[in-house]
Image (cartoon, rainbow, N blue to C red):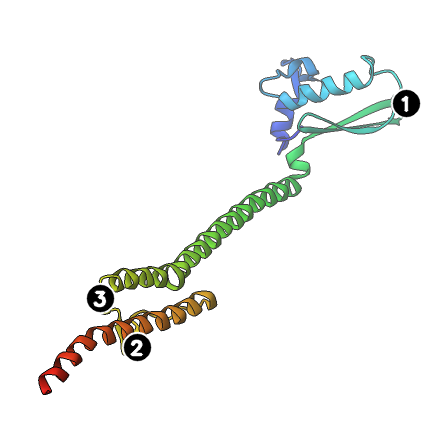
């Protein structure tokens, strides 16, 4: 029994007074220990009695086994024609405390690591998605919108989108969009020059007639 630290506690727990006048004592039996204050002792007695088939006088082998959260071990030894039965019962966490704690710690660490991996993956996905959206806007969507805006202005003979033979927009690093921007610049430049020539032709004609 655990908790029997000194002789006083041992005497009080294991013995009972038979005759106080003569100081006669007797060992307590299992029936003297209630299950509320001595749960492991009662559980151990029940386990060994069950293992012995209800008869402790019978012959049975030494054995160690687990019931619930407790480890039980029984061994027998004969000394001076007396047969002693030694029963040991300890909570599983006392016997395998470090191992159980290690398993719990590993489980907790695994959960934390999984959470970190999931959060990191979400952050990476969101970051890459944001970068992809910004890239598409800066180098694809915005250049195409500027080209469409220049086309709309050109249909109204507004060539303010052209300055020095160049479109007022940043050239895209995307090859296909960059090629489209160059081709569009050439087309609009030719169109603008043609319009200018057509507008100046009547003025030149009037100027020539006036000189005559």
Tag of residue 130: none
Residue shown at the point (71%, 22%) measured from the top left: 44
Q: Which residue is mark 1?
A: 81
Q: Tell whether 114 sits left or right of 103.
A: left
Q: Secondary structure at mark 2?
A: loop
Query: In this rendering, which labeled residue sits more in front, label 3 or label 1?
Result: 3
Please tell me in which quadrant of the rendered image residue 136 appears: bottom left
Q: Secondary structure at mark 3?
A: loop
Figure quadrant of the N terminus: top right
Residue shown at the point (37%, 68%) measured from the top left: 184
Residue reaching furthest to the front: 212
Q: Which residue is mark 2?
A: 165
Tag of residue 158: 3
- Mark 1 or mark 2, which has the lower sequence index? 1
Q: Tell whether 124 sits left or right of 99.
A: left
Up the image or down, 106 lies above or below 169; here it is: above
Pinpoint residue 54: horizontal percent, then vertical percent.
80, 12
Q: Tell whether 28 sits left or right of 212.
A: right
Which class describes the residues within 10 Å of circle 1: few (<14), some (14-19), or many (20+)?
few
Which class describes the residues within 10 Å of circle 2: few (<14), some (14-19), or many (20+)?
few
Whether pointer 3 and pointer 2 mark residues with C-beta atoms closer than 8 Å, the reply is no
- Mark 3 or mark 2, which has the lower sequence index? 3
Up the image or down, 151 lies above or below 166; here it is: above
Distance from label 1 to label 2 (Cα)?
A: 120 Å
Up the image or down, 203 lies above or below 25; here it is: below
Up the image or down, 97 lies above or below 44; here it is: below
Pinpoint residue 94: horizontal percent, then vertical percent.
65, 36
Figure quadrant of the C terminus: bottom left
Task: Please name whichever residue, 198 or 75, is drawn nearer the observer in this view of the structure.
Answer: 198
């Amino acid at each position: 029994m655990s908790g029997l630290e000194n002789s006083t506690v041992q005497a009080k727990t294991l013995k009972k007074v038979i005759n106080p006048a003569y100081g006669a004592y007797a060992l307590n039996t299992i029936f003297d220990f209630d299950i509320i204050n001595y749960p492991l002792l009662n559980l151990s007695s029940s386990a060994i009695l069950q293992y012995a088939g209800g008869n402790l006088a019978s012959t049975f082998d030494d054995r160690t086994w687990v019931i619930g959260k407790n480890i039980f071990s029984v061994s027998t030894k004969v000394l001076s024609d007396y047969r002693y039965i030694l029963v040991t019962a300890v909570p599983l966490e006392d016997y395998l405390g470090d191992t159980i704690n290690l398993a719990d710690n590993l489980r907790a660490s695994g959960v934390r690591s999984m959470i970190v991996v999931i959060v990191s993956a979400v952050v990476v996905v969101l970051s890459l998605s944001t970068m992809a959206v910004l890239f598409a806007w800066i180098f694809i969507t915005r250049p195409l919108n500027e080209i469409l805006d220049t086309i709309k202005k050109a249909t109204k003979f507004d060539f303010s989108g052209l300055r020095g033979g160049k479109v007022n927009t940043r050239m895209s690093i995307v090859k296909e969009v960059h090629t489209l921007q160059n081709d569009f610049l050439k087309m609009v430049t030719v169109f603008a020059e043609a319009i200018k020539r057509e507008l100046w032709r009547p003025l030149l004609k009037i100027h020539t007639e006036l000189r005559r």
